Amino acid sequence: MSAPLLEVRDLKMHFPVKSGFFSRAKARNFAVDGVNLTINPGETLGLVGESGCGKSTLGRCISRLYEPTAGEILFKGANLAGMRHRQLLPYRQNIQMIFQDPMESLNARHTVGEILEEPFLIHGIGNAQTRRQAVSKLLDTVGLPGRSASRYPFEFSGGQRQRIGIARAIALKPELIICDEPVSALDVSIQSQILNLLMDLQKEFNLAYLFIAHDLAVVKHISDRVAIMYLGKIVEQASSDDMYHRPFHPYTQSLISAIPIPDPHHTATRILLKGDVPSPISPPSGCAFHTRCPKAQASCQHDAPILKTLAPEHIAACHFAAAP
Amino acid sequence: MTAPLLSVTGLVTEFQTDEGLVRAVDGVSFDLPPGGTLGIVGESGCGKSVTALSIMGLLPRPNGNIRSGEINYHGEDLAAADNARLQRIRGNEISMVFQEPMTALNPVHTIGRQLTEVVALHTDQTPAEQIRTAVAMLERVGIPAPELRMTEYPHQLSGGMRQRVVIAIALICEPRLLIADEPTTALDVTIQAQILDLISALQQDFGMAMIMITHDLGVIAETCEQVVVMYAGQVVEQGSVFDIFDRPQHPYTQGLLRSIPKLTDTPKQPLDIIPGMVPSLHDLPAGCRFANRCQHRTAECDHAGLTLETVTDDHSVRCLKWRQL
């Protein structure tokens, strides 16, 4: 077994919650609250959860857009968690991000050529001529015509813009890309084009992905392993296939049962959850899921479960975990 | 055979834009029986939402206009109805639920006021009765502590709760037709499941017909009896939900069904794709609008005059080649 590319240990990101302009933080938002995960070179880890579960915050901590409150982010053994801007610079080449809305993440006043050249300029790579060559090669790699370089983002469709976002992310040959809902804003027929592109690039450049999404069918398709997040914590993690065939955690079971299946002969047996996700500012005591859990017992209100190995390479945090 | 509740015939809706006249809906026809459920599926810009807005008389004026066609609701042509008449119908006979509950609700009015407003407009209930009706409706859509919620504002509710309020407003006068335009797209999976269950339970209770507009084929398969597949402003295929999913005839429908990732897939396999993208509505081809992305294209496909051909009684397809495919 080779060394992992990324190892996250007990990562916490607590945002201060302020009320009023001058007042001090009154509470904390426990957005990410003690997450452990590893990603191997060339592997995709899918990260699934509902809005507000902390999955995007976790991604932004790993790419160090945020400075985490506590914990370690070991990238090839170096801890990024406490690093300052200058120390981080060499690692920024290696960890890139792709965002959900390519229109908002691309500068509308720059041509596509300028957008794609910028990473090389920031890191002082090459001269004007080699950079131009690199840009046209990037466009070719992501399936855009070479003449796109002189055009502006608004001239492209959503799917093409996401290709530009992907080209920018792979420009500096990173080893890890954090993909934050990269296909959820796209139409169905375009979504599959982008997923195929991501899988092709992974093979070609041995890229590792942290693939953040709420759509389990998409995540299953692209991931080797999947982690399920609920209120700042990972509640279950397994190989992609195992997660869908044998979910142990009641939350995972209800998530899978909630997906509408595109087959009119299928009769859904849904495990409907009561209510909404509680606020991460005051997460429930004990097991955070107990307020909505169909299997909750009195003890779940005060005993927080820990992640236990329930099958090979399959962990879940539930006192009453059982395969369906 | 009962008479349809809603019958749309040859609907053409156009928009005046800076770049000229755009035909967003081009000859859409379908029937909806009382209590039936029709799904309209398609990608952004295919005309599914504009079809809904045309039925509701909610096209943005003065740019959007119904050019031709009939929208026959219960013997009355809504395409020709004036605004005052449409206002009587909206909320009372036909209601609509939108994708984004935060923009559908008025942020500066209480939930209670937004509910009672509809009752006051369409019934002659006294204010006290209006409040009782509103509270009962909030309870019916599964909102805990409805009396308290009446006094709150939309921002105080979660996304799922807001969508429940929007549904309560839409259904408070017990309409005979509900148009749901991507009602769960902005919601999380577990909340989506709650809302879809709620909508179908209420549909049963009220015996209401529904048009479900969505891009999600899973939602279509779970909720609809009849399906209309739209592409670039036209209906390319329509039939029962079993026709569309088991025996799709149009290459676009077939491609869509193949390209969606399914839970039963083996991970990390390449997906089937539909290459290319939808043509611009400013620059539509004369022949088949899907031709540039279709693997079965031949020279004939570029000739004008493609019509919906009958496959079986209520299954039709807009493709020259469907017999050979």
Image (tube, rainbow, N blue to C red):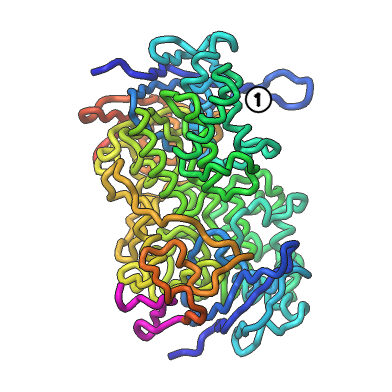
Q: Chain of mark 1?
A: A
Per the rendered image, the range of residues in magenta is B308-325
Q: For residue A236, which quarter of the picture?
A: top left
Residue at position x 40%, y 40% in the image: A293
Q: Main secondary structure of the magenta part?
A: loop
Q: Position of residue B257 (x, y in %)?
A: 37, 60
Residue B323 in the magenta stretch? The answer is: yes
Q: For residue A312, which quarter of the picture?
A: top left
Residue B106 in the magenta stretch? The answer is: no
Residue at position x 67%, y 36% in the image: A110
Residue at position x 33%, y 29% in the image: A43
Element under disc 1: strand
Is residue A61 in sight in this rendering?
yes
Question: Please, what is the three-letter code of the amino acid marked with disc 1?
Answer: Val
Q: Is residue A129 above or below residue B63?
A: above
Does residue B11 appear left or right of residue B278 in this picture? right
Residue nearest the viewer, comparing A319 with B232: B232
What residue is pinned by disc 1? A17
